[in-house]
Amino acid sequence: MPARLIVEGGVALRGEVAVSAAKNAALPALAAALLTAAPVVLDNVPKLADVTTIRSLLGRLGAEITDESDGSTRIRTVSVRSHEAPYELVSTMRASVLVLGPLLARTGVARVALPGGCAIGVRPIDQHLKGLKQLGAEIAIENGYVEARASRLKGARITPDLVTVTGTENLMMAAALAEGTTVIDNAAREPEVTDLARLLSAMGARIEGAGTERIEIEGVTDLSGARHRIIPDRIEAGTLLVAGAITGGDVTVTGAVPAHLAAIRDKLEECGATIDVDGDRVRCRTPGRPRSADVITSPFPAFPTDMQAQVMALLGLAEGTSKISETIFENRFMHVAELGRLGARIEIDGGTAVVRGVERYQGAPVMATDLRASASLVLAGLAARGITEVSRVYHLDRGYERLEAKLQALGARITRVMS
Ligand code: EPU
């Protein structure tokens, strides 16, 4: 039954809220468990739809996954039963492609459906494939599937043409079991890549340079089991801080890594918010109407594309005009039309959205188009006068753990209805 969220706007959110673990760190960590027959135990895996999807994929491939009584998730793949990530799962979640590197490295065979398009546009995996070929894999595309084969991968020097997060992760996992040394130049520096490197190292991989643009991996013949705690979700933390800012409230997120939030914190300050950091706590206060600011999204450590929609909702209420540019993703402005239904004045000019701040949003029925767009609509609804009804909430459920409950705890009037 499709769910909708009913948001009654106008309450300034106040209080403290704990950050969940990062979806985009949990997905590669779960996939990495395919690299070994020994158990991998992950603490803090968030309960959200994309995690359910990858769990069901891993289950089909032969992993046994159990929820332990201490809240951890235990994954054990004694043997790989299937080599295939089917289209029905890859088309639901592109990150399913993260099983390609581990399957190939562990068993020498992988068959993964090509992702094709998704709500945020065509996102090819050519750089994953180019890198795997450089590691010695034979790659064929047949009937919409990537078929990869290798007897044993061999270390190589790889320079992806662009910075890719899951591409870097796939290559790092594959190289961990390759013969010899692999160097990935132009690697993604996202904290989620570094977190995966930490897990792989705990499993016995030899990795240096994660978090920089040059990662060096010395292959080993076997990896062991490990226990690993997933890092906090910087995008969820940022979303909750914007919830405070957009309602003129006072929100503190706890259990965060402030360094991962640097670009987001800076942007919120530019918008007029006061940000205080104390250990793992980040507090955001906004006295009045936000100030306009320009935003350019780029790979970490720059401002993340995954926060663009949420910050656009905030800037839509700013005094003055803001320009928001996407340097990589061209199709990440689908929320613009929906924000317009709430009264936002935003025009798209190529890869740039020109946002002319209005004084208030007004509640209206709106439709979520993708994960982060749905968060942006909820945030705008929190600031709007009247009732905003957000449909297609399954997009939100893909990547946020208990977001409504967290917002409610901060005072938001938000309820879920099934229809
Ligand atoms: N690209 C290629 N070829 C490739 C790989 C990427 O052309 O082989 C292009 C993409 O089309 C895109 C750009 O390179 O234009 C960057 O894409 P990237 O590969 O970095 O994205 P991703 O790894 O598929 C991850 C996150 C996304 C996040 C992006 C950018 C995961 C599971 N997903 O995707 O998260 O937006 O990095 O930071 O880590 C989300 O959580 O809502 C989400 C979409």
Image (cartoon, rainbow, N blue to C red):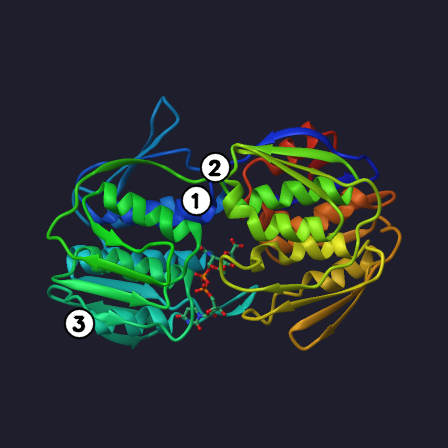
Element on which disc 1 rests: helix
Quadrant of the image occupied by residue 15: top right
Q: Return the residue at label 1.
A: 51
- The residue under label 1 is which amino acid type? Val
Q: Residue furthest top?
A: 69
Label 1 residue near ligand 1, CB within 8 Å: no
Which badge, 3 or 1, comes first in the chain's sequence?
1
Residue at 57%, 60% (x, y): give it.
305
- The residue under label 3 is which amino acid type? Gly
Label 2 residue near ligand 1, CB within 8 Å: no
- With 397 as the anchor, is 98 left or right in this view? left
- Disc 2 residue crowd, few under 14, some 14–19, many 20+, Cα 10 Å: some
The image quadrant where one finds the C terminus is top right
Question: Which label is found at residue 47?
Answer: 2
Q: Is residue 414 above or below residue 222?
A: above
- Disc 1 residue crowd, few under 14, some 14–19, many 20+, Cα 10 Å: many
Residue at 78%, 58% (x, y): give it.
292
Viewer-side label of 3, 2: 3
- With 227 as the anchor, is 369 left or right in this view? right
Q: Is residue 129 above or below residue 6?
A: below
Q: Position of residue 274 (x, y in %)?
A: 71, 41
- The residue under label 2 is which amino acid type? Lys
Q: Return the residue at label 3.
A: 136
